[in-house]
Amino acid sequence: MEIIESYGLILMVMAIVFGLYMTWGIGANDVSNAMGTSVGSGAITVKQAIIIAAIFEFAGAFIAGGNVTKTIRKGIIDPSSIVNNPEILVFGMLAALLAAAIWLMVASSRGWPVSTTHSIVGAVIGFAMVGIGVDAVEWGKVSMIAASWVVSPLLGGTLAFLLMMSIRRLILNTDNPFHSAKRWGPGYIFLVGFVISLVTLFKGLKHLNIELTVGMSFVVAALFGMALAGIGWYLISRVEVDPDADRDFHFASVEKVFTPMMIFTACAMAFAHGSNDVANGIGPLAAVVSIVQSGGEVSQKAALPLWILVLGGTGIVIGLATMGYRVMKTIGSGITQLTPSRGYCATLAAAATVVLASRTGLPVSTTHIAVGAVIGVGLARGVGAIDLRVIGGIVVSWIVTLPIGGALAALIFFTLKGMFT
């Protein structure tokens, strides 16, 4: 308690700096995954991706992310044994933020799409093992995270593969692919609006005092999807056949129809990601602020003030703008060659899987889902269409995320403890 009283302001400032660094890492890595398919397919530019992320990531976090975040990442550790030593948890959360941020910076500089959630979870586990004790870690939850290395990409990949096959059957393999694309395009845009509405409604809007039944949620989502399909129909109707481009690539005009559709999916993916992962990334910051402001009270949940969300949104946009291009390149062109139609399938599949996970509580990672979705799209054209060497590197980076985050956090925890005590 004495340490909190004596160094409260310093600890708050450190939490804000480390939190900004962490959200910079989220922007450079996690958000780049979400935007990579859209940029890689050529549907939007990097500049447009930054603008879309700035608006929809923040909107997702604010509207669908809720106003409460679990300070102990997804119940990974039990803090009951350190209630009388709140400074231990403060040092631990600061260590977790800095450790996860450092690993995200390293991964982003190498173009590795790693999981922000797993980075912070690994870091929290590392601090808990050395700061509280091995028994404080909920190892059952850790095994569920390990399972998500398989579950996440498998779900995203399967859905993307099925979407790609539907586009092949309904559009690409028809007598007049361009006409078929204009005919089915609004339907695919309806799917985007429907799916992204459901993630918002299913996650609950209690902080906005809006609570709907499952049936009402489906009705509202369907209405929103229809409205979006109407806008999409208007945009698609303006696309004309380009005979010159079709001579170089048979489906060039068809891909032009998918370009406005990709803008919808980019916005949808940014919103879905914001609602799931942004608040998670700043959870440890909220924990430190809560403990310091309450004079040392340790709780499993803490209010998420608006200024922390704004800080998170700012860090994310800066991260995406400064280093996001490396991870975008891996997702957008490193795994398989993307076109707007392929990018559409990968992005919608990823967003839909996030919805499913939010509703069912499956332990999934947005990053792993996005990578799996891109692989699924590639597999629709055969194994030869994907770069197995790039995938191998990505999988290794996933596996080492937890132990590296843990080791870094343990080291930083001891350093902070030594400095303040």
Image (cartoon, grey):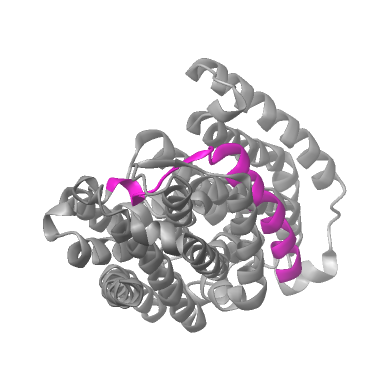
345 or 34, which is in the foreground?
34
Count of picture labels: 0
Task: Write the residue at 36% across / 53% down.
Answer: 152
Q: Quadrant of residue 390?
A: bottom left
Q: Tell me if residue 305 comes above or below residue 389 in the rendering.
A: above
> Looking at the picture, how far across and down is residue 327, in whole percent?
53, 74
Q: What x and y, as percent, mark residue 215?
A: 51, 16
Q: Is residue 275 above or below residue 114?
A: above
Q: Is residue 214 visible?
A: yes
Residue span colored magenta: 46-75
Which residue appears at 30% of the width and 71% of the height?
Answer: 421
Horizontal side of 242 relative to 57 (left or right) equals right
Is 58 contained in the magenta span?
Answer: yes
Quick check: can you spot residue 375? no
Q: Nearer the viewer, residue 240 or 317?
A: 317
Residue 309 placement, left or right of 290: right
Depth check, front residue: 16 or 348: 16
The residue sitting at 68% across, 54% down in the picture is: 262
Residue 174, given in percent of the width and then of the height, sits at: 63, 48
- Asked if the stretch drawn in magenta spans residue 250, the answer is no
Classify residue 74 as left or right of residue 63: left
Q: Is residue 356 above or below residue 115?
A: above
Measured from the top left, where is residue 56 in percent x and y? Answer: 67, 49
